[in-house]
Image (tube, grey):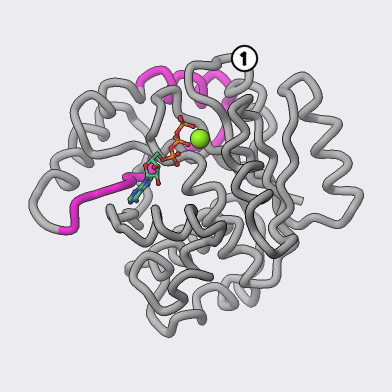
Amino acid sequence: MKTISIISQKGGAGKTTLALNLAGAAEEAGFRTVIVDLDPQASAKGWHDHRQREAPVVISAQAARLSEVLATASDHGADLCIIDTAPHSETAALAAARAADLILIPCRPAILDLRAIASSVDLAQLAKKNAVIVLNSAQPRGSLADDAEKAIASYGLPVAPVRITQRAAFIHSLTAGQTVIEYEPSGAAAEEIRALTLYSCQLAGMMANKHASRIAGKGGKRAVPA
Ligand SMILES: Nc1ncnc2c1ncn2[C@@H]1O[C@H](COP(=O)(O)OP(=O)(O)OP(=O)(O)O)[C@@H](O)[C@H]1O
Ligand SMILES: [Mg+2]
């Protein structure tokens, strides 16, 4: 089992949105996926309680019990665990970072968000784990996201080649207890999420190329930009 932790000390960066949707895309590709919700607000768990389907499983847990929970998930045959974390909680974020094969740091392309990612970058470096910044809620037009990407370069971490655009589908799907892939399987949001999932799973060392093609093949377009 591989583990992808989503951390950001800034509230509202898109941690839960990415956790649920990456898990949905991984499930679509045939990977048994578990979300561990370390946020005491339990947004991911609440989403799961309001949906009809069991998968992806969401487990609400405390950071102190994380290794036990991961071991149980692995024993039950999970291929992938995605950890959603709370903002403003260094202890839990560090535990998630240490458990990760890959850390994703979502960041909105806005100045206050860009300044605020320094502490998340520090945590990833402290944990000595592979980490990538994901631009989330990017404007579909204009140069804001390009400017943000240039500003992020000073943190010394790579930026994912797949940007997640600000789209109503991300909001409506979660309200309906769905992922964007369930909500609008051929939509642009679903396409971005499949691409980010493929990229992340490859970086996490999760799959051989034949598995990668299972995600890349959905939706019919190239998943990761050349
Ligand atoms: N790409 C997007 N397009 C449109 N809305 C988005 C996008 N990403 C996130 N949102 C919305 O922004 C809000 C915050 O997102 P989310 O809850 O995922 O952030 P978070 O980092 O988990 O927040 P917290 O730190 O409070 O846990 C939610 O209302 C969500 O629907
Ligand atoms: Mg959240």
Give the magenta part as a residue range.
118-140
Residue 199 part of the magenta segment? no
Image spot of residue 156 (x, y percent): 34, 30
Q: Is residue 27 above or below residue 92?
A: below
Residue in the image at 55% along x and 73% along y: 215
What amino acid does circle 1 point to? Thr
> 97 or 27, which is in the foreground?
27
Label 1, on which residue?
91
Instruction: Identify the residue at the far right of this view.
Output: 75
Tell me: 33 left or right of 133.
right
Classify mark 1: helix, strand or loop. helix
Residue in the image at 77% along x and 51% along y: 1
Q: Is residue 8 above or below residue 73?
A: above
Instruction: Identify the residue at the far bottom of this view.
Output: 220
Residue in the image at 46% along x and 76% along y: 185
Image spot of residue 222 (x, y percent): 39, 77
Name the image quarter holding the C terminus: bottom left
Image spot of residue 178 (x, y percent): 55, 61
> 145 or 169, which is in the foreground?
169
Q: Where is residue 132, by image quadrant?
A: top left
Tell me: 71 left or right of 24.
right
Residue in the image at 45% along x and 19% along y: 122
Tell me: 154 left or right of 192.
left
Q: Where is residue 141, by image quadrant?
A: bottom left
